[in-house]
């Protein structure tokens, strides 16, 4: 169902799948969440991951589901306007917390983020998936700003997930013949509308779960690139058991076709349209 386009954000999101929203977080929130990311990078929780191969320069760090163990990440979901922003973009009546994820590239990290869609990584069906991607540092092309293929959320394909690091369980898990092979975006670059946004700390990019996106490495010798991705799900999302995905999502043990309301402990409602 096509959402009612009530706002410029909703219209942009529906048309091209991505929108830059400046100044979503103030300096206090930026400092709080930047500090939380630094703690996560120092403590290395069980689900955290180093995306660099052994011996590669720099550091590309990831972690997820932090909201379940850290009050600062929980507050990012419950106490900021991000859920309302996702609901406005999607035209949703109700917005669930889905999960959160850190992507941090330290200076001098050449490893890129591969072109991919987020949706095929998830055990779900539906169209109302939005990420609110928060910048905690100034971000531009040099230090690894994400690029988005405008309109690709409407291409109709679901592309085989790309492993962010070579080898290991991740690469094998994503070798699913049910999904299409992703287009060669680099070869098509001259024919596509590719957007990138220079971000100030506290800015957000809101983008659709089926939008193709990727990023270069951090070529800056001194500037960090710390980002927090808050994932949200709307009204039409239903579970799908047969998609290999992150263990913390598989552990939800929902049945195919069930709504997220069946597990309010894992997927609480954060926002409802008034």
Image (spheres, rainbow, N blue to C red):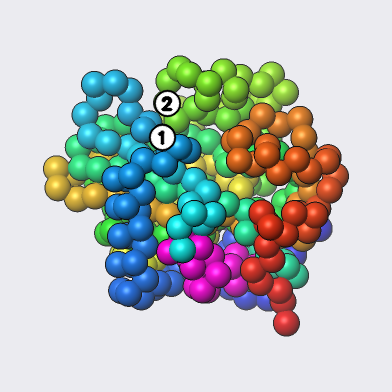
Nearest the viewer among 40 and 206 is 40
Quarter residue 264 falls in = bottom right
From the top left corner, tell me how far across and down residue 1 is, in percent: 81, 58
Element type at mark 1: strand
Q: Can residue 151 be seen in the rendering of this structure?
A: no
Q: Are marks 1 and 2 in contact (CB under 8 Å)?
A: yes
Q: Residue at x 30, y 60 (%)?
A: 35
Q: Is residue 88 magenta?
A: no
Q: Which mark is residue 165?
A: 2
Q: Which region shows up in magenta? A: 72-87
Nearest the viewer among 145 and 167 is 167
Magenta-drawn stretch, dominant element (helix, strand or loop): helix
Marks 1 and 2 sit apart, C-alpha to C-alpha, by 10 Å
Q: Is residue 273 left or right of residue 226?
A: right
Q: Quadrant of the C terminus?
A: bottom right
Residue 79 lies, with reference to residue 217, above or below; the image says: below
Q: Residue at x 42, y 26 (%)?
A: 165
Q: Is residue 75 magenta?
A: yes
* Dot 2 crowding, Cα within 10 Å, few <14, some 14–19, many 20+: some
Residue 191 lies, with reference to residue 132, above or below; the image says: above
Q: Can residue 162 be seen in the rendering of this structure?
A: yes
Q: Is residue 147 left or right of residue 5?
A: left
Q: Which mark is residue 49?
A: 1
| Nearest to N terminus: mark 1 or mark 2 | 1
User: Which residue is outermost to the left?
Assistant: 221
Q: Residue at x 69, y 66 (%)?
A: 269
From the top left corner, tell me how far across and down residue 210 is, in percent: 62, 45
Nearest to the eye among marks 1 and 2: give it: 1
Element type at mark 2: loop
From the top left corner, tell me how far across and down residue 166 is, in percent: 43, 20
Quarter residue 204 falls in = bottom left
């Amino acid at each position: 169902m096509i959402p009612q386009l009530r706002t410029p954000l909703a219209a942009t999101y529906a048309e091209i799948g991505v929108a830059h929203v400046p100044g979503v977080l103030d300096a206090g929130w930026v400092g709080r969440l930047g500090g939380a990311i630094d703690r996560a990078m120092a403590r290395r929780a069980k689900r955290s991951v180093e995306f660099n191969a052994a011996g590669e320069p720099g550091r590309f760090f990831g972690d997820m589901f932090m909201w379940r163990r850290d009050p600062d990440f929980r507050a990012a979901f419950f106490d900021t306007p991000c859920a309302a922003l996702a609901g406005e973009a999607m035209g949703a009546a109700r917005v669930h917390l889905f999960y959160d994820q850190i992507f941090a590239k330290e200076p001098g990290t050449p490893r890129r983020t591969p072109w991919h869609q987020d949706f095929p990584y998830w055990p779900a069906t539906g169209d109302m998936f939005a990420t609110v991607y928060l910048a905690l540092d100034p971000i531009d092309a040099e230090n690894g700003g994400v690029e988005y293929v405008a309109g690709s959320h409407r291409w109709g394909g679901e592309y085989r997930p790309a492993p962010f690091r070579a080898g290991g369980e991740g690469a094998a898990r994503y070798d699913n013949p049910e999904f299409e092979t992703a287009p060669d975006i680099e070869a098509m670059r001259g024919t596509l509308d590719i957007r990138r946004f220079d971000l100030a700390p506290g800015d957000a990019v809101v983008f659709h779960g089926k939008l193709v996106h990727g990023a270069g490495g951090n070529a800056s010798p001194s500037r960090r690139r710390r980002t927090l991705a808050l994932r949200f799900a709307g009204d039409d999302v239903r579970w799908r058991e047969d998609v290999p995905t992150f263990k913390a999502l598989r552990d939800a043990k929902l049945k195919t076709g069930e709504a997220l309301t069946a597990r309010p402990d894992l997927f609480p409602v954060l926002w409802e349209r008034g």
